[in-house]
Amino acid sequence: DRINILVEEAKKHNIKVLPPDINESFDNFTLIPPNSIRFGLVAIKNVGHNVVRVIVEERKKNGDFQSMADFLTRMSPAPEEVAILNKKSLESLIKAGAFDKLGSRKEFLEELENLLSFARESQKTKQYGQESLFGAEESPNNHLIFSKNNSNNKKLASDEIQWEKELLGMYISDHPLSSHEHLLKDDVVLIKDLNQEKIDKQVKIAGVINKITKFITKSGKPMLFVELEDLTGKIET
């Protein structure tokens, strides 16, 4: 699709593609000088245009979100407004890496129910003008203390890499083959190096299977098409 084509073109020109960020991303891709582009929030599965519009408008009006608690408080609708941030969209933003600079994905997901409780509490506080319906000692805010990620090079776990693939349609921060790159150097042909000269020749390629398509030919025989991806591109065979 259009996003995959754009990302492939960026890589060809040595432009680094960054995952979405709650304080830097807009609707679509954003140029980050000197040589990077950042994913837009609309590209995240389960995150609609209305959610993104409210996030961007709030950020423009009152500055960057300083913490998860700050985000949930400011995103809680006023009494006359309808809530647009639901469990699915919040979970998807977390899994896609949009909050990585404010804490770890796994820690946020482990506390997801507390995050949602805090969001509901913030909405009630706005509605009724009360300090806390829970009381000072029981407020969910007491449980919303997370360690910020100061390293941009933190190694992601395999399930976190898969979350990006699931929600963004591609691997961004890392790739499942990265840790096996040393095994792909000898007689393995990279997908980007497959060309006309290699047609009808036996070659060895290695990659991650993205998709398997099964169908029956006109002659009644079963056939498979497999989409394979390595660190340099994709191929269907």
Image (tube, grey):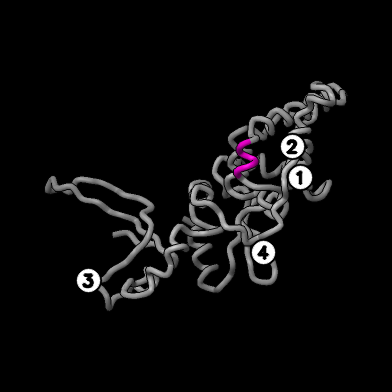
The alpha-carbon separation of the residues under discs 1 and 3 comes to 54 Å
- Element type at mark 3: loop
Query: Do we see residue 26 in this rendering?
Result: no
Circle on res. 195: none
Residue assigned mark 1: 67
**Residue 28: x %, y % from top left:** 62, 54
Question: Of discs 1 and 2, which sits in the foreground?
Answer: 2
How much space separates mark 1 and mark 2, taking CA atoms? Answer: 9 Å
Residue 86 at x, y percent in the picture: 64, 32
Which residue matches tag 4?
Answer: 31
- Whether tag 1 and tag 3 are in contact, CB under 8 A, the answer is no
- Residue at 14%, 48% in the rendered image: 221
Relative to 75, is 226 above or below?
below
Q: CA distance from mark 3 to mark 4?
A: 42 Å
Of circles 3 and 2, the one toward us is: 2
Task: Tell me which numbered mark, 1 or 2, is placed earlier along the sequence.
Answer: 1
Type of amino acid under label 4: Leu
Mark sitting on residue 144: 2
Name which residue type carries label 1.
Ser
Discs 1, 2 touching: Cβ within 8 Å = yes
Residue type at mark 3 is Gln
Label 2: state its secondary structure. Answer: loop
Tell which residue pokes out farthest to the bottom in this image. 197
Tell me the residue at 78%/41% (across/down): 70
